[in-house]
Image (cartoon, helix red, strand yellow):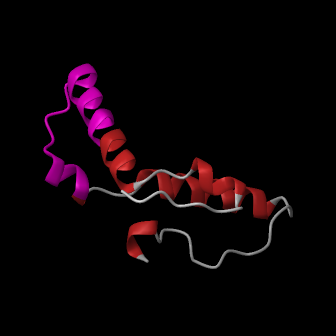
Amino acid sequence: MQEITTTDPSAAQRLTADQLAERVAATRETLRERMGCPLTDEELDQGPDVLANLYALAAEKVRAQGQMPPPEWVRGQSARGR
């Protein structure tokens, strides 16, 4: 994989596709081992994007307190739905 260079400091913290796939696989393995989750990868992929929904709820709460501008997308629309 070719190395990408940038002056954006947050870019160094972004994961490559391979790194992200490894983390997803490790998380799913942990879920299955420690929680006895019987779901297959396909079943997990079809489930809701819980993290995106949590971020949406948190952003809505912050906006309600007047600390953040209105969202570009509506509540309930996950990152997968874009």
Q: Image height check: is 28 above or below 20?
A: above
- Closer to the camera in the image, 43 or 76: 43
Which quadrant: the C terminus?
bottom left
- In the figure, is residue 62 to the left or right of 10? right
Outermost residue to the right: 66
Give the image location of residue 35, x and y in percent.
26, 24
Q: Which residues are magenta?
A: 25-45
- Closer to the camera in the image, 72 or 29: 29
- In the figure, is residue 42 to the left or right of 79? left
Look at 85% across and 61% down and name the residue there: 67
Give the image location of residue 3, x and y in percent.
48, 57
Q: Image height check: is 3 above or below 71?
A: above
Look at 61% across and 57% down and name the residue there: 11
Look at 23% across and 50% down and name the residue there: 44
Asked if residue 26 lies in the magenta stretch, the reply is yes
Dominant secondary structure, magenta:
helix
